[in-house]
C-alpha cells in the first residue's frame, strides 16, 4: 500500500508579485506553504495567476503563449506599453530564493522580446536556471484532450515531466531539434558529406539522450502510478514508435542510430522530413481497469488518468527527483470530479505536502479542504481571503 509520508520537503511560493501581467496592473499576494484555492467568476483572473506561477519554471508557461502575449494590454491598445514581470519568494529543499522573471526592457524604452530571469537579484544567463529554485507541474482544461490530440502533444507532455526530473533534458532536446533541421537542410542542398556525417553524429548523441531521459521518466512514473487510492485509475505507460522499439541505450544505441540515419538519407531527402528518431515517439497510456487505451475511455476517465499521471509525477519527484514535491497548478480541477474523487485528490495533495494552486468558480467544491488550505476570492484584479 502507498505510504503517504513521501516527502519532507516541497516547493512553496510564499510571496507573489505581478506587474503589467495580463489582467493585473499590479498584484502582491502573501501566502503560506499550504495549498491555495482561487475561486471567482469566469474571467476574474484565476488562470492568469496560475500562468504567472508556471513562468517560475523554464519554458512558455501553462498557456504555451508567446512572451509578448502575457504583457498587459489596456482596452484599445494594440501593443503593450510595459514589459510584464513576475516576482516570487520560493521556499524549497535548498532554501528560500527570491526569483523574478519577465520581459527584458528593450533599447529606447520599448518592450523587449526576450525573457529575463533573476535569482536573489542576480541575472541568470538562461531561464533554465529557474529549475534550480522551483519545480512546477500543471494540469489545465486545455490538456483534457491530450489522449485525443497528436503524438506531438503527448511528447511535449512527457518532455515537460522529464524536464522536472532532469533539467538538462531541455538542452538535449534543443540540440536534437537543431541537428534535425540542419541535416534536412544539408540533404536538400546536397551539402558536404563530412559535414552531414558530423551533424548525424550530433543527432544520434542528443537524440539518444532525449530518448533515454524520456524512458527514465516513464520508469519513474510507473513506480508511482496508482492504485494508491481507488479514486484514480490504474494505468500502464509505454513510449512507442519504431525508434523507441529498436532503441538500445549507450554507445551501441548511438552507433545504430547513426547508421540508420546514413541509410535513410535518400528516403528522408525524398520525403522532405526525418523519418526515424525520437521525434516520432508517442506516449501510450492504457486504463488497466477498463483494459482500454486512454483515447477510447470516457472524458471523465481520461481526466482521472491525467490527474493520476500528474500526481505520480509529483510523487516521483518528491522521492527521486529534486527530493521535494513540485508546485502543482491545477486549473479548473474540481469541475469534472465527483465528491469522492475530489476528496481523494485533496488527501493526496496534503499527503504529498505539495503546495497545489487550484482554481474553480464555486468555493463549495473545495469545502473538503477546510483549513488544510487557504482560499481567496478573485474579483476585479484583487484577491480577498475567504
Ligand atoms: N494581455 C492581457 N492584457 C490584459 N488583460 C488580459 C490579457 N490577457 C488576458 N486578459 C484578461 O484576463 C482576464 C482573466 O483571465 P483568466 O485568468 O483566464 O480568467 P479566469 O478567472 O476565468 O481563469 C480575461 O478577461 C482576459 O481578457
Ligand atoms: Mg480560468
Image: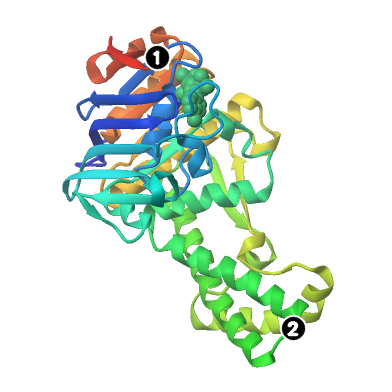
Q: Is residue 217 above or below residue 272?
A: above
Residue 241 appears at what percent x and percent y?
Answer: 67, 60
Q: Is residue 235 above or below residue 281?
A: above
Residue 248 appears at what percent x and percent y?
Answer: 56, 74
21 horizontally vs 273: left or right: left
Q: Residue at x 33, y 15 (%)?
A: 382
Q: Residue at x 30, y 15 (%)?
A: 375
> Which numbered dot is residue 18?
none
For this rendering, which residue is in front, 298 or 199? 199
Write down the quadrant of residue 187 in the picture: bottom right
339 horizontally vs 11: left or right: right
Write down the quadrant of residue 29 in the picture: top left
Q: Residue at x 40, y 39 (%)?
A: 83
Q: Is residue 347 above or below residue 190?
A: above
- The residue tagged 2 is 263
Q: Secondary structure at mark 1?
A: strand
Q: Is residue 264 visible?
A: no
Residue 66 appears at what percent x and percent y?
Answer: 53, 43
- Structure colour scheme: rainbow
> Which numbered dot is residue 39?
1
If the image is split into quadrants, where does the C terminus sit?
top left
Nearer the N terminus, badge 1 or badge 2? 1
Amino acid at each position: 500500500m502507498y505510504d503517504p509520508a513521501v516527502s519532507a520537503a516541497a516547493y512553496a511560493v510564499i510571496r507573489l508579485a505581478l506587474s503589467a501581467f495580463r489582467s493585473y496592473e499590479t498584484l502582491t499576494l502573501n501566502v503560506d506553504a499550504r495549498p491555495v484555492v482561487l475561486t471567482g467568476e469566469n474571467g476574474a483572473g484565476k488562470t492568469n495567476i496560475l500562468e504567472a506561477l508556471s513562468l517560475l519554471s523554464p519554458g512558455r508557461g501553462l498557456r504555451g503563449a508567446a512572451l509578448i502575449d502575457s504583457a498587459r494590454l489596456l482596452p484599445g491598445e494594440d501593443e503593450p506599453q510595459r514589459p510584464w514581470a513576475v516576482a516570487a519568494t520560493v521556499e524549497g529543499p535548498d532554501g528560500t530564493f527570491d526569483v523574478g522573471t519577465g520581459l527584458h526592457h528593450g533599447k529606447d524604452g520599448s518592450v523587449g522580446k526576450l525573457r529575463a530571469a533573476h535569482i536573489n537579484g542576480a541575472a541568470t544567463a538562461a531561464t533554465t536556471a529557474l529549475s534550480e529554485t522551483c519545480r512546477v507541474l500543471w494540469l489545465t482544461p486545455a490538456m483534457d484532450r491530450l489522449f485525443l490530440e497528436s503524438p506531438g502533444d503527448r511528447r511535449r507532455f512527457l518532455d515537460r515531466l522529464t524536464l522536472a526530473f532532469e533539467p538538462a533534458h531541455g538542452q538535449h532536446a534543443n540540440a536534437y531539434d537543431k541537428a534535425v533541421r540542419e541535416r534536412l537542410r544539408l540533404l536538400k542542398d546536397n551539402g558536404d558529406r563530412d559535414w552531414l556525417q558530423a551533424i548525424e553524429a550530433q543527432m544520434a548523441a542528443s537524440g539518444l539522450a532525449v530518448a533515454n531521459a524520456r524512458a527514465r521518466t516513464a520508469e519513474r512514473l510507473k513506480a508511482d502510478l496508482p492504485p494508491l487510492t481507488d479514486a484514480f485509475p490504474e494505468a500502464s505507460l509505454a513510449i512507442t514508435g519504431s525508434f523507441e522499439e529498436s532503441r538500445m541505450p549507450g554507445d551501441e544505441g548511438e552507433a545504430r542510430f547513426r547508421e540508420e540515419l546514413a541509410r535513410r538519407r535518400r528516403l528522408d531527402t525524398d520525403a522532405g522530413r526525418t523519418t526515424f528518431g525520437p521525434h516520432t515517439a508517442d506516449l501510450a497510456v492504457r486504463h488497466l481497469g477498463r483494459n482500454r487505451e486512454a483515447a477510447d475511455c470516457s472524458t471523465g476517465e481520461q481526466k482521472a488518468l491525467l490527474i493520476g499521471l500528474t500526481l505520480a509525477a509529483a510523487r516521483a519527484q518528491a522521492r527521486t527527483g529534486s527530493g521535494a514535491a513540485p508546485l502543482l497548478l491545477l486549473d479548473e480541477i474540481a469541475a469534472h470530479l465527483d465528491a469522492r474523487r475530489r476528496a481523494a485528490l485533496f488527501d493526496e495533495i496534503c499527503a504529498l505536502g505539495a503546495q497545489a494552486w487550484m482554481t474553480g468558480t464555486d468555493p463549495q467544491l473545495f469545502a473538503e479542504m477546510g483549513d488544510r488550505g487557504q482560499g481567496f476570492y478573485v474579483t476585479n484584479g484583487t484577491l480577498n481571503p475567504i
